[in-house]
Amino acid sequence: MDNSILLSVQDLCVSFFSEKTENQILYDISFDIHKNEILGVVGESGSGKSVASLAILGLLPHKISKITKGDIRYNGKSLLDITEKEYRVLRGNEIAMIFQEPMSSLNPSTKCGKQVLEILLQHTTLSKTEAKTEVLALFNKVKLPDPDRAYRSYPHQLSGGQKQRIMIAMAIACKPKLLIADEPTTALDVTVQKEIIHVLKSLQQEYKMSVLFISHDLSLVSEIADHVLVMYQGKMVEYGTANAIFHHPEKQYTKALISARPTTDVRFKKLPTIADFIDNKDHHKEIVTKEQRQAHHSSLYNGPALLEVKNVEKTYFSKVGLFGKREFKAVDDVSFKLYEGETLGLVGESGCGKSTLGNTILQLDKATKGQILYKGQDLNTLSSSEIRNLRKEIQLIFQDPFASLNPRLTVGKAILEPMQVHKLHNNDTERKKEVIRLMKRVGLDETYFNRYPHEFSGGQRQRIGIARTIALQPKLIICDESVSALDISVQAQVLNLLNELKDSFGFTYIFISHDLAVVKYMSDQLLVMNQGKIEERGDADQVYQHPEKEYTKKLIQSIPRGK
């Protein structure tokens, strides 16, 4: 065996079992990870990426899964032959893992410093004082802004990016030879994502670690990986150097993954999807010209504004000591106009005030100051019953469709329920017909009517959320990070669907996201928010091509582009 190979996976097959059926998840997966190398594994949800990583760690659920074929060799030794006790010594010490969702991986009832401290006390001979010093040094290494505060904080007191840094510190605490990073930057801001990637890369070089980096974003993987493995439905699609995979992909599926992300230089009328590439369809190549865009905008901005936000502020107060209070302006003197049929992009990092602004427009949170005029009427002056009636006209598509759907209601009833509340259509028979029509319109089969939310994928659940939103025939829809946690390919399908629905029903969108590439593709006008204020505004293409403010430039530079 080649001495430079740290981990070798050979013809790995994994199956999951129920009482009556066997479902094969991985089919003959083979790859090598060399010492001091980063291997990127990329593919959509359900492609088997995480199952492969759990198999390496010996963490596949024992009673319902089994490695049916193949071998996993670490430093020349088969991991399939070692005991659970030997595996426990290996995990954390030599092979460590960073999980996708830090909040569910960290203990919410234990301070962050103590959680990393426990790892060192269990796997090393350091005293408690020495271990604490080492934890603070690790927090410095992962670029936590205030290591002492992070040490004393509970997970809920830290931001998403800070929690992910705690997870990285925990994973590298014992200086492992192999680090498995499973979607470590999904749903993080592009700027935070870039920082996390930089931290991982510098730590890998410092410790000379090997890294298995799992993601659904090929552009992101190409920025960090030496070699790339592309997976689809449990099978290997393509395997080679990052340069070869990214610049000279051989398979249609790989080309589709690269192209499905909104491009930063060309505006396609419709984003290419996996199906387009596999079926060799050419309609995704249609480009919106500058002249077409200008003609559309001249007709769009001819009439009166549908929504006008004037000098809106939203201030929150928190207690300081016994009698003092501190004020925090989440939204600070924001003004803009929104026209019927327009998509207004609202972009910025987490905590910049995007969602708070959306909530004040929806009247879920009252503005502290300023006016919000919808069709000329000030929303701040409406009574509770008038606001309830307004809900039909202004709707929201949530970031997490699973959390926003009642797990006890079938999806058909979830879509039908708002129609009942607002007394749309004459009876439930008519409503059911309308629900089935809407389900078909968003690409869902009518047989899904009686299924529950947990039976669907993330992309399907987002379509259910969209169907529920448009069931009330609204005029204005606020899309709050509605594609941020989706696979790149599913994201392309949902963005295309939103544009199709806009054309068919005449919707007006406020599209909120931290991903400038997605917002640029969707938007007519763009508002860049920073610390509650509008930092920059203008035509989406113009702002992207010629940003004036440093903050906007930083956001643009953080978009993954690949090598």
Image (spheres, rainbow, N blue to C red):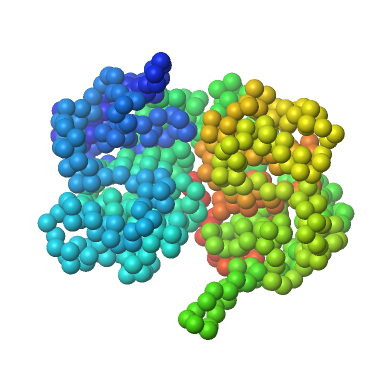
Residue at x-position 35% and y-position 53%: 107
Q: Does residue 115 appear in the picture of this structure?
A: yes
Quarter placement of the C terminus: top left
Percent across and percent down for residue 484 are: 55, 46
Percent across and percent down for residue 339 are: 80, 53
Residue at x-position 50% and y-position 54%: 189
Q: How many marks?
A: 0
Indicate left or right for 109 with 343 as reference. Answer: left
Q: Does residue 553 appear in the picture of this structure?
A: no
Percent across and percent down for residue 141 are: 29, 61
Residue at x-position 37% and y-position 21%: 17
Residue 266 occupies which quadrant of the picture? Answer: top right
State the residue lying farthest toward the left.
125
Percent across and percent down for residue 422 are: 79, 44
Residue 19 occupies which quadrant of the picture? Answer: top left
State the residue lying farthest toward the top.
20
Q: Nearer the viewer, residue 210 or 135?
A: 135
State the residue lying farthest toward the right.
303
Q: Nearer the viewer, residue 491 or 194?
A: 491
Residue at x-position 33% and y-position 59%: 110
Indicate left or right for 20 with 487 as reference. Answer: left
Quarter placement of the N terminus: top left
Q: Nearer the viewer, residue 547 or 211?
A: 211
Residue 393 vertical position relative to residue 414 in the rendered view, above or below: below
